[in-house]
Amino acid sequence: MKAALLKSFGSPLAIETVSVPVLGTGEVIVDIVATRVLSYMNEVFDGTRNYALDLPIIPGPGGIGRVRAISPDATRLAVGDWVFCDPTVRSRDDIVAPDIALQGLTAAGPGGMLLQKHFRHGSFAEQMMVPTENVKRIGAITPEDATRWCALGTLLVPYGGFLAANLRPGETVLVSGATGNFGSAAVSVALAMGAASVVTPGRNETILADLVRRFGSRVQPVKLTGNEDHDREAMKHAASGPIDCVLDIMPPSVSPTVVRAAIMTVRPNGRVVLMGGVGMAGGAGLELPYPWIMRNCISIHGVWMYPPDAASRLIALVRAGLLRLEEYQTTAFDLDHANDAVAHAAANAGPFRMTVITP
């Protein structure tokens, strides 16, 4: 089959013919129809992000495709089914604290690297071998629809955060980082889950206005000034009531003071979800006042990715019409132009914009 390989950090992807994956027990082989290209894949490939990848590797986290072959322990899947390939691979011998690898992207710790040795190759290829439990049926779609369904990979991240926080219909949510790719996805997911109001702080007034245009009066934009105390009060005022849940999904480049201003808007007995990158680039970490956390009974959830059943539940929200994939504008490249796709994704990052490869 044809595939794009990363052979060394800093080198372009090599488009080559490689051996097709061989089916084993507990695995499914999928013909990849479309796969998203993360906006920061160029930083992964040049080594800037220092992701744990044992090279050479076929990159690509997740994708949309059709089942080609199933192993004997699968009882519901059928050849030809349209599916989402969930890249969050978990070890099967410790259900309480499994090791995790993101297939085709990175791995967490020594256990994750062991997983990557087997479930290593991602979706920048014509076929992909996936753990059976990571293959999620999406129902009948057309090949043209497959590119837009790639948005599941983006939407699932904030969905995992809201599931951890037990977000309930009618609550007020604040999304810290709402003008980014994952943050704007968080806004749409919170509304689909029944949030009564979503406060969206940010500096880009054009994007803030676009969020209101897309989703209406349930979105409450706040223009940030950089003054921590002023911004905190402005966010509280925009909510017109207690803020039940704050989700932070800011990138590593953002100052911790900006993140803290958003987090400390949450009401007493409220919940905070941390999914962003504060301190990951080597800067200062997030400092929160111990007395404020304790006296206000604040629950803080650190969340990486999402639980195993999240993809199927999110697909149900899409099928019910509560979550609109039509918000996403997609640009597609064939596999021969994978390097062009990576460059395009980096240059065209932003809310509801997606670059895909169609092997």
Image (cartoon, grey):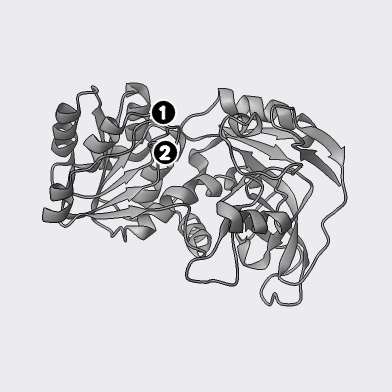
So how many labels did they put on this image? 2
User: Is 299 placed left or right of 48 in the picture?
Assistant: left
Q: Residues within 10 Å of mark 2 (few under 14, many from 20)?
A: some
As drawn, 254 above or below 301: above
Residue 164, given in percent of the width and then of the height, sits at: 36, 59
Seen as rendered, the residue at the extreme front is: 110
Residue behind mark 2: 277
Q: Amino acid at mark 2?
A: Gly
**The C terminus, quarter of image:** top right
As drawn, 120 above or below 213: below
For the residues bearing labels 1 and 2, Cβ distance under 8 angstroms: yes
The answer to which of marks 1 and 2 sits earlier in the sequence is 1
Foreground of the two, 322 or 287:
287
Secondary structure at numbered mark 1 = loop
Foreground of the two, 111 or 79:
111
Foreground of the two, 47 or 183:
47
User: Is 182 placed left or right of 123 in the picture?
Assistant: left
The residue located at (31%, 41%) in the rendering is 175
The residue located at (67%, 67%) in the rendering is 132
Residue behind mark 1: 253
Q: Quadrant of residue 168?
A: bottom left
Whether residue 144 is visible here, answered yes or no, is: no
Q: Amino acid at mark 1?
A: Ser
Secondary structure at numbered mark 2 = loop
Seen as rendered, the residue at the extreme left is: 295
How far apart, in angstroms, are the residues tagged by discs 1 and 2?
Answer: 8 Å
Whether residue 186 is visible here, answered yes or no, is: yes
As drawn, 207 above or below 76: above
